[in-house]
Amino acid sequence: MPVDVKKQAVTDFTIKGHSRQCSGLIKLREHLLVGISPFNSRFSPDYVEALLVWGHKNFAQVDVLLPDEENTVKLLLATGQPAGKAMRKTRQELSRHRRSVMQAIDKIGDLATHCKTLQFSDYEQHPKYQHLKLATQNCYESCDKFRSACINMSAQAIRGRSGSRDKTDAFLDKVNLAIPYIFAEMPFYLNSPEIMQINSSVMAYHRLWPIGDALFAGEFALRVDKRQGHGVVSCVES
C-alpha cells in the first residue's frame, strides 16, 4: 500500500536503482539530484525537508532540480487554462517549491554550503545540454516509438491534472503543447554529470519515469551515460 505522505511523519527513505548500472552508482553515494515536480502535492515542505536530510546523510552532495517557468507553464496551458492564469499559477508554484527547499536548507544547517537549487534554463547555454536537448528533439521526430512514449507520458500527466479522458484530436493538440517539457528535462536524465561537471549522479524521484525502461533497454537512439543513475525513493513508515 502506498504511503500517504500528507498524513505520515516522514523520517527516512529507501532508494532502488532503475537498473544494475543505477544500483552501482547509488552505492558510490557521490551525488543525488532530487527531482521536484510542479503541481504535485507530494512535495510538501515536510516531505522536501525529510528527503533532503536523508540525502545529505547518505550522499556526498545533494542538489535539487526544478523546471523553469517557460516549460512549467506549458503543463497548465495543455490542460486548457488561460495564459494569464497559467503563468500566475506557475510562478506561485515554483516560488512555493523554492521556498520549501530554502527553508529545509536553513533548518538542516551545513547542507546550505552543499545544496543548490537548479532549473532547466540555468543550462540552456551549456553546449552539452544543448546537444542532448537537440538529440532528444531529433529522436522525437525520427523515432515513432520514442514519439509515442513522449505523447503517452505527457497525456498521462495532463489527465492527472485535468481528470480528462478525452482522446480527440483536440486533446492531442493540447498534449503537444507539453511535449517540450520532456525535451528540456531529458538532458538531466541522460547525462547530468557531464552537464554539471561532476563524477557521477543519481537522479531521485518517487516513481519510475515511463520512458526509462525503453531507454535502458537501448530501444531509442538516446543513451544514458554510464555515470548517470536513476533511483526511486520510497518513504519508510515510522
Image (cartoon, helix red, strand yellow):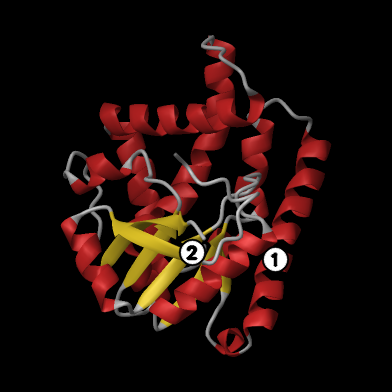
Name which residue type carries label 1.
Answer: Ser
Quadrant location of residue 61? bottom left
**Spatial separation of the CA atoms under disc 1 and disc 2:** 13 Å
Residue at 52% from the left image edge and 85% from the top image edge: 114
- The answer to whether residue 227 is visible is no
39 or 52, nearer to the observer: 52
Q: Position of residue 33 (x, y in %)?
A: 45, 67
Relative to 233, is 64 on the left or the right? right
The image's mark for residue 13 is none
Do labels 1 and 2 touch, CB within 8 Å?
Answer: no
Q: Position of residue 103 (x, y in %)?
A: 71, 73
Quadrant location of residue 52? bottom right
Q: Residue furthest front?
A: 238
Q: Quick one: label 2, few (<14), some, or many (20+) residues within 10 Å?
A: many
Q: Quadrant of the N terminus?
A: top left
213 or 218, nearer to the observer: 213
Residue at 33% from the left image edge and 79% from the top image edge: 30
Q: Position of residue 16 (x, y in %)?
A: 31, 57
Residue at 35% from the left image edge and 26% from the top image edge: 148
41 or 152, nearer to the observer: 41
Q: As displayed, is residue 47 above or below residue 42?
A: below
Residue at 17% from the left image edge and 44% from the top image edge: 217
Name which residue type carries label 2.
Answer: Val
Q: Secondary structure at mark 2?
A: strand
- The answer to whether residue 234 is visible is yes
Q: Which residue is mark 2?
A: 34
Q: Quick one: label 1, few (<14), some, or many (20+) residues within 10 Å?
A: some
Q: Secondary structure at mark 1?
A: helix
Please tell me which of labels 1 and 2 falls first in the chain. Answer: 2
The image's mark for residue 100 is 1
Relative to 111, is 228 on the left or the right? left
